[in-house]
């Protein structure tokens, strides 16, 4: 049930616990009750005191389910294509949109096992499509599978994060970064355009690396992300006659498997933390929340923007 998945996400309790006898789990009930009455929906979810537990009943959980559904199923009846949906930020976006009622078309490139796991976590059947975004032939084949689909949301998250130090970057590496991070999103948008409903949303995942400089040998990555923000602004005007809104989300450091190796170095991690005024790094769920907002009716008059979601890391 979608309600059980949502309460699991909110409380951190396992699905088995959720489906067991409700009266025997006062902590779960207290968390459900608090979540049902908490309109902010931002992580982490904290129980506001054990004194609530004794007064919660199974009926409160039912009320929680209903209220959660009313809050979260705001995207019911819509369809979203998410590229790079098998891991990290893409995985979190898929889970968030599915939790809010959207049908998700999940794109992956290499790891089908991880993609299948995301489908299981979403709790319902999902269309899986595979393509290397650097290959126009594979993209055409992918979109041939989607012939007849109608999309409300196109979320382009797939990308690579690799260094490109001057004097030590082979042509193959340069092609991979540019083809995947810049040309790939362009081709995906061009191929998806006939499937997008009037009034649809295009959301690009860029990066604050596109608006700042660093002597870290990642200039080409930053350039591709600056290019994504430029495409966002231009497409917002180009597609405005169809009512299609185009925005990008620009994270800072995000704790995912893609950045794990880089942030595993203590000096790098400590330096990153020193630059974060909020005292923590960004999570994939932080980004997914902003993407979900841009898909909602609350964002119906926002277009051509690159939203900085770095927690003050870059201002």
Image (tube, rainbow, N blue to C red):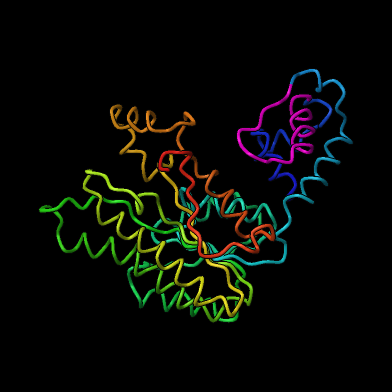
- The image position of residue 86, as x and y in percent, is 48, 54
**For residue 106, side relative to residue 228 (left or right):** right
The correct choice, above or below, for 55 with respect to 155 in the image is above
- Magenta span: 26-48
Residue at x 14%, y 53% (from the top left corner): 166
Residue placed most toward the observer, 108 or 152:
152
Q: How many marks?
A: 0
Is 43 magenta? The answer is yes
Corner quadrant of residue 24: top right
- The image position of residue 53, as x and y in percent, is 81, 22
**For residue 245, side relative to residue 270 (left or right):** right
Q: Residue placed farthest to the left in the image?
A: 167
The correct choice, above or below, for 243 with respect to 74 in the image is below
**For residue 206, side relative to residue 12 (left or right):** left
Residue at x 45%, y 77% (from the top left corner): 190
Corner quadrant of residue 101: bottom right
- The image position of residue 60, as x and y in percent, is 86, 35
Quarter of the rendering occupied by the C terminus: top left
The correct choice, above or below, for 190 with respect to 227 in the image is below
The correct choice, above or below, for 302 with respect to 236 in the image is above
- The image position of residue 310, as x and y in percent, is 46, 43
């Amino acid at each position: 049930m979608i309600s059980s998945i949502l309460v699991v996400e909110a409380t951190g309790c396992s699905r088995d616990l959720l489906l067991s006898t409700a009266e025997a789990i006062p902590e779960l009930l207290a968390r459900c009750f608090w979540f049902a009455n908490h309109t902010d929906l931002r992580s982490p979810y904290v129980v506001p005191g054990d004194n609530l537990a004794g007064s919660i009943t199974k009926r409160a959980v039912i009320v929680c389910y209903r209220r959660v559904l009313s809050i979260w199923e705001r995207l019911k009846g819509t369809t979203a294509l998410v590229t790079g949906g098998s891991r990290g930020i893409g995985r979190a976006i898929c889970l968030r949109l599915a939790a809010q009622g959207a049908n998700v078309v999940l794109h992956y490139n290499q790891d089908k096992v991880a993609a299948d796991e995301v489908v299981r976590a979403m709790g319902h059947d999902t269309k899986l499509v595979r393509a290397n975004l650097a290959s126009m032939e594979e993209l055409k084949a992918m979109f041939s599978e989607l012939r007849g689909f109608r999309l409300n949301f196109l979320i382009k998250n797939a990308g690579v994060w690799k260094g490109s130090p001057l004097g030590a970057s082979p042509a193959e590496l340069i092609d991979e970064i540019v083809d995947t991070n810049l040309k790939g999103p362009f081709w995906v948008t061009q191929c998806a355009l006939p499937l997008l409903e009037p009034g649809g949303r295009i959301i690009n995942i860029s990066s604050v690396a596109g608006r700042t400089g660093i002597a870290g040998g990642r200039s080409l990555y930053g350039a591709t992300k600056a290019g994504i923000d430029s495409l966002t602004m231009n497409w917002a005007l180009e597609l405005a006659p169809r009512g299609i809104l185009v925005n990008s989300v620009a994270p800072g450091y995000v704790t995912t498997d893609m950045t794990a190796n880089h942030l595993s170095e203590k000096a790098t991690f400590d330096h990153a933390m020193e630059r974060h005024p909020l005292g923590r790094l960004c999570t994939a769920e932080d980004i997914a929340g902003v993407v979900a907002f841009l898909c909602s009716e609350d964002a119906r008059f926002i277009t051509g923007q690159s939203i900085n979601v770095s927690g003050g890391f870059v201002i």
